[in-house]
Amino acid sequence: MSTRRLYYDDSYLQSFEARVLSCLPAEPFASESGTIPAWEVLLDQSAFYPTSGGQPNDLGCIGEAKVLEVRDDGEEIVHIVDRELAIETVQGSIQWARRFDHMQQHTGQHLLSAIFQERFGLPTVSFHLGAEICTIDVRGPEPAEAILLGAQRAANAVIFEDRVVNVRYGTADQLAEIGVRKEVEREGILRAIEIEAADLQPCGGTHVKSTGQIGMILVRRCNKIRQDWRVEFGCGGRAERFAGWDFRLVRAISDRLGCAAEDSLPAVEKSLAERDGNYKKLREALQQLAEARGELMVGAVLPNTDGVRVIAEVLSGAPQDFLLLLATAIAKREKTVVLLIAEETGQLVFAQHASAGKNFQDALKKVTAEYPGKGGGTKDFVRAKLADAAQSTAALDLAKSLIGG
């Protein structure tokens, strides 16, 4: 028996009466608090929207049972609940805040998609209504910032006019005759949502009665997703939260930069340029320091009987980049081996001049077998990080013994 879908004709219906047709044990449901027992309930009619078309399902209660999930199973709506229900007449109630939020987002999506297609030639190929973010994927050339802003402004202009949102029914041919945005190949009577003088789109979802109830649309950003462009947006209450969060973020940044909010971007760009310049200077200074310190460290160590110098040291307070620069500077010298470990982090670099003839891959495997860590490299050069930096000195002593230091 098919379920009568009450939300088709009245998306604002918050409570309803229905007859329980069946209640059967279901697979345990994975909730936020853990896995719990669940039952599948069929009703003769329901106002609960099932997950479909990019829109998540409604939540609420059926009698004393909490609705955990709602699924679309062909002609039937399956309600997943947290307790068994008797075969009797029950009251259902919809979690209204969630439903109305979904109505705002979904109607806003119809309007935004229509404007992207009609004004900018960018058809929507998919829609996702997330818990925080909504997205549409549009196909075509990359939407420039001017297009994103233009679509937002045009959509909000329609919202502010508070145009009527109607539910239309008809066959695919009848809807095509009156200008449906996306034709569908389905038999029988179809349901479509019409935004007055803006859009007509086949849809089984829940929607507001007029565009003014969308509140507003805020387009946030656009990213490349395979061959399409993913546009992120929010409507109504979400748009309000996004705008407030974005403003507080900009204000916090401008306060830290000591400038007006409108001057934040130039101030950030200036700070980044200064940072990049300072990093380049620091890198050059570290390189010079590594060369000088490497010279001193090599001069302080006598060659072994095989003519190989082994320089081994646990460094304290050294920048991460310095470890690599110092090892590279020392290993340029013939028959020289360098073993360095950073005391605070357990980062290690083992390097050698090829003429030294050691195998650091083998040495690293033995060191990390005794003192756990992750890393790798070649016969002449390896990098790794110990799981416990306190083992740095012991790991260095083992490495020295393995390569004959």
Image: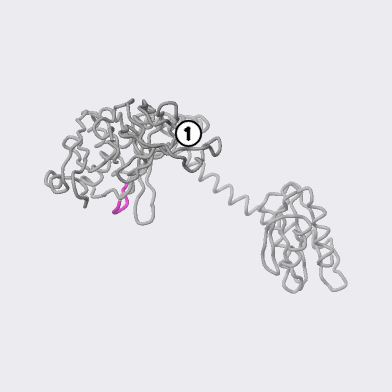
Q: Quadrant of residue 94?
A: top left
- In the rendered view, would you say 357 is above or below 162? below
Q: Is residue 22 above or below residue 124?
A: above
Q: Residue at x 22, y 28 (%)?
A: 162
Q: Is residue 225 above or below residue 41?
A: below
Q: In the image, residue 43 lies at what x, y percent?
A: 34, 34
Residue 227: x and y in percent read 35, 56
Please tell me whether mark 1 sits on a helix, a strand or a loop: loop
Task: Give the residue at x 54% y 39%.
Answer: 35
Instruction: For the C terminus, give its image quadrant.
Output: bottom right
* Disc 1 target residue: 82
Quadrant of residue 99 within the rendered picture: top left
Q: How is the image coloured?
A: one colour
Pinpoint residue 24: horizontal percent, then vertical percent.
44, 39
Magenta stretch: residue 18 in it? Answer: no
State which region is magenta: 139-144
In the displayed structure, 157 sits above or below 338; it is above
Q: Position of residue 137 (x, y in %)?
A: 33, 48
